[in-house]
Amino acid sequence: MKVVTGEEMHQIDRYTMESIGLQEELLMENAGQALFLALEKEKSVQEANRIAVFIGAGNNGGDGFVVGRLLNEKGYLVDVWTIPPIDRIRGTAKTHANIYQRCGYKFREYQEEYETFYRNINHYDVIVDGLLGTGIRGEVRKPYDEVIAAVNESKAKVFSIDVPSGIPSSTENEQREVLGVKADKTFTLQAPKLTAFHFPYASFYGEQITLDIGIPAAAFQKMNIHRELWDETRVRNSLPKRSDHAHKGDFGRALIIGGSRTMPGAPILTTRACLRAGAGLTTLATPLSVATAAASQAPEAMVHPLANEHEQEEWMSSVVSVLESNRFDGIAIGPGIGRDQRFSIFDMFSGFQGPVIMDADAIHNVAYEKERLKEASFPVVLTPHPGEMAVLTGETVENVEQDRFHVAKAFAMDFGVYLVLKGRYTIVTAPDGKQWINPTGNPSLAKGGSGDILTGAILAFCLQHESIQEALCNAVYIHGYVADQLVECGASPMGLVASDLINEWPYAFR
Ligand SMILES: NC(=O)C1=CN([C@@H]2O[C@H](COP(=O)(O)OP(=O)(O)OC[C@H]3O[C@@H](n4cnc5c(N)ncnc54)[C@H](OP(=O)(O)O)[C@@H]3O)[C@@H](O)[C@H]2O)[C@H](O)CC1
Ligand SMILES: [K+]
């Protein structure tokens, strides 16, 4: 499913109307019908004594008029409020306002009776928010700011149409305080909007449901949008199937390089996750101080002791000799190495051709020689969290977080790498700039060890998928999905640790 900015959606609408010939009146009717059907399924709507529909000046309000008409038709007790005077409503929204009136239904104007409006707002069980949609520009103006504040203070269930009113639908906004409707649920029309996956905006959306309003696929294709949601269907369709007569050689030889005296656990978690995610043969190369613990905690793995991490030269040559004396199909480097030492991944891995996943401390190292990413002999996957992304770009974490999509895309394209920018909605970016957003995961993943296991799963999946992009998207999806499953079964996000996720991994799609 494509994820769009408001501007992209407007262009898609325009193409649908002007080149395909589906008119806006019809799209608005479709939107209202789809919204009405979705609302009717809501318990709070079924049980509501009184429902309010709030309508703004644009087409978001037009959708509101269609919903208001259909709710009236089915006998719900509805108050339809227009925030601007009715004569300010124009175009297609006006057409549907006229249809509403000709069907014999009443509406109230905020400007005429705003005292009643604020008195009544506490008596509504449900508010349908058709105030502002993708057409908002700049800061929320009067009186919408006051109306939005009142909606947020009311006890009603709030259902937003398309976007929570006040929330922009692109991330290219100057930093300002965000004022928006805090929706319980947002019914997005046709395609999810970008800010639904970008904080601070995402927290206003509540649960997100996408409704089909009949915009043809051809209109999306024409626009060439390279940003998509990676959902469960995509995972199920792209996860490799194991044949009955498979053997371990079919699933790749994985090498994990990591660990140090003070961080022995990280590479062990990566190794265990790599095994659980199905790699055929998994080897851990780690300093002697970690090797014994690793052998007992990941007995299915092979362990190659490396030189002490403080002996920089020796450590690097021990890595090289592990690579020279064995054959590996993919490598993950970074978990628990520590920040004290400098090493060159490109010197150590020269000539290697399988995928190399660089995580954690390896990212800090590669930042010093990032120009060499452009000439790597192997496909590179970088898995930074926002702090590590800031190290890579030389920007502040705030700058990264302000525009994650653009920062990730620019870096992946400039340096020709796959980039997994971690966060509540992790973004996978391919070297050609295409992006996929991961919807799974919860706060239990905001914890030490969670990145280490993702790295192991990514390595294992890269060895089992034809496409690196699909491997990354699927690993990220399942990593979050497993955490979601555990929380759904009653585990507290506070108490879950990375090992719990590793143990749950095989049951992800039971
Ligand atoms: N394909 C689809 O998804 C369809 C979506 N539809 C719905 O249409 C809206 C987008 O409609 P649009 O008219 O472009 O925009 P809005 O409804 O958001 O309203 C814009 C008007 O709001 C006023 N405005 C703009 N900025 C502000 C602000 N900062 N503060 C207050 N008011 C603001 C302005 O009106 P004025 O008269 O005050 O100038 C704008 O004109 C989309 O979200 C869907 O809900 C359609 O139904 C068809 C298909
Ligand atoms: K809205």
Image (cartoon, helix red, strand yellow):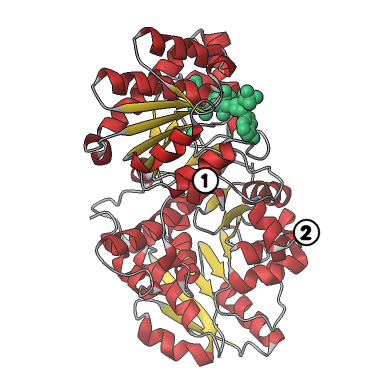
Q: Position of residue 177 (x, y in %)?
A: 64, 51
Hey, which quadrant is residue 73 in on the image?
top left
Tell me if residue 321 comes above or below residue 14 in the rendering.
below
Nearer mark to the viewer, of 2 and 1: 1
Q: Can the viewer see residue 377?
A: no
Could you tell me which secondary element the residue under label 1 belongs to?
helix
- Camera-side residue: 130 or 303? 130
Q: Mark number for residue 203?
A: none
Note whether ligand 1 is within 8 Å of mark 2. Answer: no
Q: Nearer the viewer, residue 271 or 223?
A: 223
In this rendering, the answer to whether 432 lies above or below 137 is: below
Find residue 288 and report its horizontal and vertical position in percent. Answer: 52, 91
Snapshot quadrant of residue 260: bottom right
Give the alpha-carbon distance from disc 2 to disc 1, as whole Å: 49 Å
> Is residue 265 in sight in this rendering?
yes
Structural crowding at the residue carrying mark 1, measured as other residues with C-alpha within 10 Å and reported as few (<14), some (14–19) or many (≥20): some
Instruction: Say the numbered circle drawn on residue 149.
Output: 1
The residue tagged 2 is 371
Badge 2 marks a residue whose secondary structure is helix
Disc 1 marks a residue whose amino acid type is: Ala
Q: Residues within 10 Å of mark 2 (few under 14, many from 20)?
A: few
| Residue 391 shown left or right of residue 115 in the figure | right
> Which amino acid, mark 2?
Glu
Of the four image quadrants, the one with ligand 1 is top right
Tell me where residue 395 appears, x and y as whole percent.
Answer: 75, 61
